[in-house]
Image: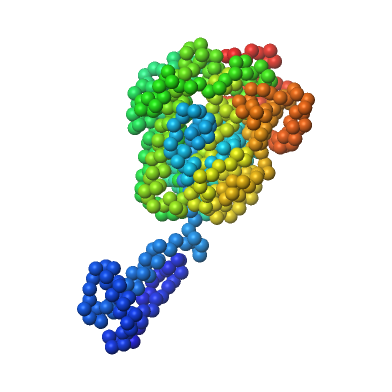
Amino acid sequence: MKNFMIKGSKVNNRPFKFTLDLYSTSNTRAGEIRQSESFSSQFGISCPNAAGRTFLLMMGVLSLLFQSCSEAPKQQNGTEQKPNVLFIAVDDLNDWVGCLQGHPQVKTPNIDRLAAMGTLFTNAHTQSPICNPSRTSLLTGYRPSTTGVYGLSPWIRDVPDLKDVVTLPQYFSKHGYKTYATGKIYHGGYGDRKTDAEFDSLGPKSGVKKRPEQKLAGETPGGNNPWVDWGDFGLKDEDIQDWEVANWAVDVLESKPEGPYFLGVGFFLPHVPLFAPEAQFGMYPKDAVQMPPMLANDREDTPRASWYNHWDVPEPRWKWFQEKQQDTLFVQAYLAAISFMDSQVGRVLDALEKNGQKENTIIVLWSDHGFHLGEKEISGKNTLWERSTRVPLIFAGKNVGTAQKTDEPVELLDIYPTLNELCGLPVKEGLEGHSLVPQLKDVDNPRSWPAITTNNWNNHSVRTKDWRYIRYADGSEELYNMKKDPNEWTNLIEHPEFRSMADSLAVWLPKDNHLPYTGNYQRVLEYKNGEIIWQGKPIAPDDPIPGF
């Protein structure tokens, strides 16, 4: 017998040695010859003598060894390689998604495909109906009432109490992940600057790549903001910045990056301006567009305080849209923008399918908050009602149940601890959300907490499966039975028989409310010395509601 020893550096992260015993031709066993013959047959090679067959036997065993090594999951520190994360963020997308049935005409085949691949949370809500505080909350793991970030500024690294907070992508980086980001992950370019240290590798920023020479919507109230525009002016896919964002993400995935990695992809649409390619506008002919359900004089049973959070904003009141005959055009543009964004989500999902890493990747798709298109007589966001708070939230991929959904109330705040648990990262103490892994394993698992949304200091909404309770900073309230009244047309708070229900929901309101960091004051509401102050300017008790 001849003994050969083959040494390798590592198998499954451990040193190995393999000993192969080769017998002389006179002692070769029938079984070994049959194995070599099988190997020669498999690869179309024939050897007429025993020495050749012995060589083939050796090569066959080596082939099986290295095949086993290549098919074995990569390991780190003796454990299976952590899954990659594809983190898809969408801006200003309400529940107008096919799988959420928010609008009967919307076409989102790629988001719907993702929902079929995983778990859809049909009762998911943002922590704030404004971009900056919503994203700050999700990425830090703390409520707006804890951070004091309620408006479009400040950036967390400019806040003394938050400048050293370890954000979600940083936590992954700390535990061995390579982090990539493109588009809008944080608000307003935060995290994208050369001085920022939020990600290892950055792609194109979000924004508007091409604009018409003049506003398509004409002059709009609230300062004629150039961002408040919508319409079709013959754009192609490559004229939209989200196309560039998707391009970069696709390039990263096609490079088959070594894992584990965290890839954040942030799409700007359907944020205003609502400019989409001509092809997407063609999907929604103007004369066939269905308007969302609305109730005339819907604000008659809501308190004056409900106006303070969107007191004077660039998004017009719905009355203006109707008077200017822009209402249908606005809805058409929003639908077109959604469908274009969805097509870019599809490109990214396709790239993941093709690069061979899908089976070891967790995908999460979310929107930072919703958007009104006439409901409650306004456009835009900045409210504590369903249209502003309800958002798409989908998990798919490794260790996530497929083709399932749950209506348990959940929060964007839950994403941080959920990803940590799915990826096997250590528990991060102090996070205010709760892992969704129990629901990802079994959608029938109940949740012990409602979803809480905060819109500026001490204004909160509590959402359960069946109810929504709102309390404003001045103590005024609203209560809606969401099963019987999903459009929130009837405020039940003045009905004595529902007082106990309101009180039972009020116990969930945050007890500690950090005073606001004002930053540049945009979208910030303050209560100071008996005054109500919107964006740095006092609101008098008898001031008329702007634009209404």
Front residue of 209/333: it is: 333
Q: Is residue 387 visible?
A: yes
* Quarter of the image with the N terminus in it: bottom left
Which residue sits at x=41%, y=52%?
A: 357
Kindly give the residue lying farthest to the top in the view shown.
Answer: 323
Position of residue 186 measured from the top left corner of the image (x, y, whole percent):
51, 37
* Quarter of the image with the C terminus in it: top right
* Residue 62, quarter of the rendered image: bottom left
Position of residue 64 measured from the top left corner of the image (x, y, whole percent):
36, 69
Which residue sits at x=46%, y=27%?
A: 105
Using the image, determine if residue 31 lies above or below residue 10. below
Using the image, determine if residue 107 lies above or below residue 177. above
How is the protein colored in the picture? rainbow
Q: Is residue 207 visible?
A: no
* Residue 371, quarter of the rendered image: top right
Which residue sits at x=27%, y=72%?
A: 40
Using the image, determine if residue 235 lies above or below residue 70. above
Position of residue 323 measured from the top left corner of the image (x, y, whole percent):
51, 11
* Residue 523, quarter of the rendered image: top right
In the picture provided, is 499 more to the left or to the right than 412? right
Kindly give the residue lying farthest to the left in the view shown.
Answer: 48
Using the image, determine if residue 33 lies above or below residue 114. below
Position of residue 54 measured from the top left corner of the image (x, y, whole percent):
29, 79
Which residue sits at x=37%, y=25%?
A: 282
How many numbered marks are there? 0
